[in-house]
Each structure stands twice: as structure tokens, then as C-alpha cells.
Amino acid sequence: MDSSLYANPSLYDAQYATLTRDGVFYAARARKVDGPVLELAAGTGRISEAILEAGASLVGIERSRPMIAIARRRLARFGGRGRFVQADFRRFALGRTFALAVCGFNSLSHAAPAEFAAALARIRVHVKEGGALVFDLPNPGPRNPGPFLRERFFDERVGEACEVWETLEAESDPRLWERVWEYRWASGRRARETMRRWEYSEREVRAALAAAGFRVDALAGDFTGGAFGGASLRQVWKVSPVGAAVNPEIGHAIAREAA
Ligand SMILES: C[S@@+](CC[C@H](N)C(=O)[O-])C[C@H]1O[C@@H](n2cnc3c(N)ncnc32)[C@H](O)[C@@H]1O
């Protein structure tokens, strides 16, 4: 399990209710393309909603049943313009291609090193020639073992402020971040969730993109197009399909798909 939070979508939505910057960014990209957008790891439809509100159609892939159930309910008002498929982005096959694929909010960092390039290759199969994949990832920085106050949000469900305290768990691989989030509501109630992610350096992401058959068009350090550097908190990538996949195993998968 990547995160116990993905089994608790109402808490997830309460925590991220005010996060809109990334949705605005992805919706702006969706406005520029014809045809439906493919969204990987659509979750409860937070970014999907911004894309649909921008007038685009969308197919969302999401693995967690509780998360996708919320997305379907929340975005039912868009009718056939928003469709959600419960699937794993490391091994899905929709049998069609898209001019734009997006994967927001660090979601690709749930793919372990052995699966990361393969997940990108799976996505590549679904991107039209001349199309693009746009995604964001965290940029690895210094580790804080915690506990520290990670974030604070107002939980509208209960009308109370809530703090999230983070502690890092054992580090079995320097790229693996296993965290425990302790939720502390103003009333004194507490809850605990876990978050498990892999963080990849710019160099590792470039190598995986090349192996999957993507060319890098742009890398920014934030959603406003700010220059990327070692101290950036984020990696925001725009990439497009190019030639054949370099990694022979991935190449075979792509050839099979195309046949
Ligand atoms: C940080 S959430 C982002 C959700 C949504 N895009 C948002 O921005 O609110 C990451 C999502 O990735 C999904 N996920 C993780 N691994 C996945 C996989 N292999 N295939 C499909 N979805 C996956 C999780 O279930 C979760 O909903």
C-alpha cells in the first residue's frame, strides 16, 4: 500500500481542499489540446475537476477503489465528458492514444525503482505522436526525521483545525520515504496515516524517460515555470514521445501493444 490515506478519501479531500495551484496548471495545458486528456492517478478527481471545468474531456486512471468512487460521484455532473477507469498506471491498456497525458501531485513517485521506467513506457503507449506527457514529482531534498509540523488545514467536515505531524520511518533505500502522519484535531482527536513514496533525482527521471521513449521538452522547478535547480522543491516535466523505446524489455511491450 502506498498510503493508508488512499483508503480514507474523505480525510484526503479535507486535507487538500484548498490546494488549487496544480489544478490550474494542468487545466491550462488541457485547454491547449484537442480531444480528451488522460489523467494518471486521478485520485478523488481534484485535478480532474479543474480539467473538466476548463471544458476538456477526460479519462482518469486510478487504482484505489475508495478514491475513484469519490471521483465518479463528484464529477458525475460532467456526464460522459469525465470517465474514470480503475486501473494501475504501471500496467494499464486502454487501446487508444491521447494528445495530452497528465500525472499530478507526485503520483508517479509511488512507482518503485524497478517499475518507474516501465510505468512511463505504459503511459507512452497512450500518448499520440506529437502529443505530450506533463507530470510533477518532488525534488529530493534533505531529510527531516521529525516529528515536525508538516501542514495545517481546516477540516470542514467537523469544523475544526487539524495539524499533520510527520515522522520519517526507517530508510531501507535512500530514495524511499516512508512517513507516518499524525493528525491532531483541535478537539484533541488523533489519527494516524502512512505515506510511502520514492523520490527520484533529475538524473534518474531523465534516464527513465529516455528508456521509456520520451524526449524532454521542459523541466521547471514549480508550476509557474520557474527555473529548475538543486534547491527546487518540485520537478515539473513536459515530455513528448520520441522514436522507439531504448530499453529492450520496454520496447517489446510497446511493440506488442502496437501490433
Ligand atoms: C497524491 S494522490 C493524487 C490524487 C489526485 N491526482 C490529486 O492530485 O489529488 C496519488 C494517487 O495515486 C494513486 N496511485 C498510486 N499508485 C498508483 C498506480 N500504480 N496506479 C494508479 N493509481 C495509483 C493513489 O491511489 C492516489 O489516489
Image (cartoon, rainbow, N blue to C red):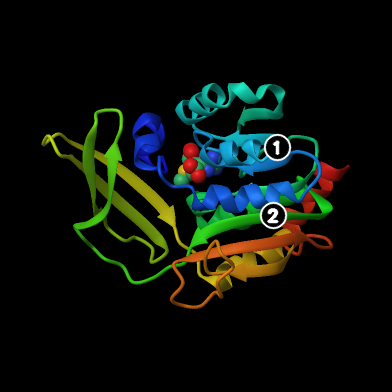
The spot of residue 178 in percent (x, y) is 33, 53
User: Which residue is more in the foreground, 174 or 131?
Assistant: 131
Crowd around label 2: few <14 · some 14–19 · many ≥20 (10 Å): many
Crowd around label 1: few <14 · some 14–19 · many ≥20 (10 Å): some
Left or right, residue 6 beside residue 137: left
Q: Which residue lies furthest to the left in this view?
A: 188
Q: Name the residue under label 1.
A: 55
Q: Answer whether residue 83 is visible to the viewer in this image.
A: yes
Q: Is residue 39 above or below residue 251?
A: above
Q: State the quadrant of the N terminus.
A: top left
Identify the amino acid type marked 1.
Gly
Which residue is pictured at 22% across the width and 42% down the height? 162
Foreground mark, 2 or 1?
A: 1
Give me the disc on residue 133.
2
Identify the amino acid type marked 2.
Leu
Which residue is pictured at 63% across the width and 29% down the height? 85
